[in-house]
Image (spheres, rainbow, N blue to C red):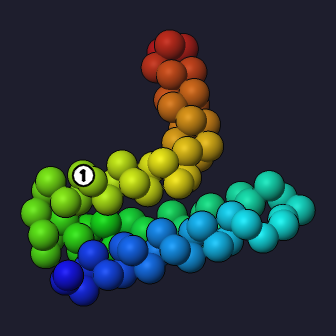
Amino acid sequence: MTLSLTLAALWALVANVLAMLPSRDNHWRRAYGLIAVGIPILGYVTYENGPWWGLAVLIAGMSVLRYPVIYFGRWLRRILLRG
């Protein structure tokens, strides 16, 4: 396994552990941190292993961070329908 895939697996493990811990803000601060760390890892995976592995890691990350993706989709739909 390449270093980039190892980092992506470690990111997924940390994300799941953080999700199990209680939080006062419904895990939003942790989600922002995971997004900030996950985007460079996603780029590294795509660079080192190709676009198909990058897409697989993107889908895995979106399944872990599904509520930020849902809220972003709602925001985007609201912006596109307004204009």
Choose top left, top right, bottom left or bottom right for residue 45. bottom left
Residue that appears at 78% across and 70% down: 21
Task: Using residue 24 as the reference point, say whether residue 32 is left or right of it.
Answer: left
Task: Using residue 71 as the reference point, say whether residue 47 is left or right of it.
Answer: left
Q: Amino acid at mark 1?
A: Leu
Q: Nearer the viewer, residue 52 or 42?
A: 52
Q: Position of residue 30 (x, y in %)?
A: 67, 68
Above or below residue 56? Residue 75 is above
Q: Position of residue 16 (x, y in %)?
A: 60, 67
Secondary structure, mark 1, is helix
Residue 36 can be seen, yes or no? no
- Please tell me how crowded label 1 is: few (under 14), some (14-19), or many (20+) other residues with Cα within 10 Å: some
Q: Nearer the viewer, residue 12 or 29?
A: 12
What is the total number of numbered labels drawn onto the structure image?
1
Q: Nearer the viewer, residue 53 or 81?
A: 53
Mark 1 highlights which residue?
Answer: 55
Which quadrant is home to the N terminus? bottom left
Task: Using residue 9 as the reference point, say whether residue 65 is left or right of it.
Answer: right
Q: Position of residue 48 (x, y in %)?
A: 13, 75
Residue at the bottom extreme?
3
Residue at the right extreme?
24
